[in-house]
Image (tube, helix red, strand yellow):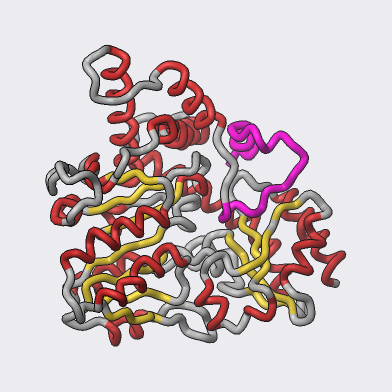
Amino acid sequence: MDIDYVRGQFPALERDFVFMDNAGGSQTLGKVIERISGYLVHHNVQLGASYKVSEEAGEKLSYATKQIGNFINTSRPEEVVIGPSSTMLLRILSISLSKQWKKGDEVIVTNTDHEANVSCWTDLKERGINVKIWKANPHTHELEISDLTELLNKRTKLVAVTHVSNILGSINPIKKIAKIVHKAGALICVDGVAYAPHRAVNVKDLDVDFYVFSWYKTYGPHLAVMYGKYNQLYKMEGINHYFFKKKDVPYKLQPGNFNFELTYSLLGITEYYQEFFKHHFPKKTKLSFREQIEKTFEVIAAHEEKISAPLIEYLDSHPEIKIIGHPVADRTKRVPTISFVHDSLKSDEIVEQVDNHRIGIRFGDFYAKKLIKDAGLEEKNGVVRVSLTHYNTKTEVTRLIRVLKDILD
């Protein structure tokens, strides 16, 4: 991967600071920033009017939504629901979808998820929905398929699970899980927030019913997207004004519409990946958009594995450090979101010393509170989390390791 090319696309990386809290929020592409500004200057009108500028704005937003659908491989543009955050979109989904359920129906959540894909479902207890928790193996912190099959039954309506834990970094076998869930007659809702910055999202291949992630963690603005199979979105009641009917997909799930300038700016992300592909594979011009995206993320995953390996090796070799998650950099098993605890130091004590070196890492529970509690890590003030992404460099990782050695050795 041409790291100089990549870093040149992110204006914030010009400053003398090492960004390693990327799972909390990535830096923004220059193309995204330009498109936000461009929309506000040239197309900042309300949609649906008959005058030319409004028509042009509508066409541009329609194109942006179509490209988002292509990016995650939806069957049709209407399967793209835009919202202010993953948390809000999942809350909207739980409200709308649960109107079809009856008292005694069941939902399964995990103890490894961010609360965005947990609380919205557990709150349905008030309406008589039973909630079961799919708990990770306490020794490996991995979700076991056999445990899921024991929880599933004829009353199960939905399984909510993360594609990648925002603490463990582990990649869950979503395609396999989806088959099991569907065989049981239930739906599956996947939180892809910690996966989408690192791997190509292909909702059609995964065969999931709902999939959600945030753009501000994938090099864009504070905005989120929810994919839903069209037939599922169509059947749901909306939360918009009374005159919007079931056929009004996705608008019935977007009260007040979506943010125009931020939605338009998402074209900067899809264009970045296309240009990334052309830069690295100038002779493979005949590949489809989908093939280009897949190829691009293969390069990104290989780079991330390469830069995370030295950090994982150092942490795993330290006698007083325990990695919470896979102690390997293998890109088939994990993304470069790396969490650890120290035998004698609390997590905040480590991070606060790193802060002085102009390196941004983080400590805490990262809203995966059930995982931290069940792992007995509350007394450590959670974990230390180093979350890398493809614009990080091997030099930056070496710099962090040197700082950690000064603090921990």
Q: Residue furthest top?
A: 52
Taking the image as shown, residue 271 lies to the left or right of residue 104, namely right
Q: Residue at x 16, y 81 (%)?
A: 154
In percent of width and height, residue 68 lies at 34, 39
Q: Which quadrant of the figure has residue 193?
A: bottom left
Taking the image as shown, residue 91 lies to the left or right of residue 49, namely right
In percent of width and height, residue 82 lies at 34, 43
Q: Residue at x 43, y 62 (%)?
A: 116
- State the quadrant of the C terminus: bottom right
Question: Can the viewer see residue 391?
Answer: yes
Q: Nearer the viewer, residue 236 or 140?
A: 236
In percent of width and height, residue 135 lies at 43, 82
Q: Which quadrant of the figure has residue 90?
A: bottom left
- State the quadrant of the N terminus: top right
What range of the chain is rendered magenta? 1-24
Q: Nearer the viewer, residue 72 or 38?
A: 38
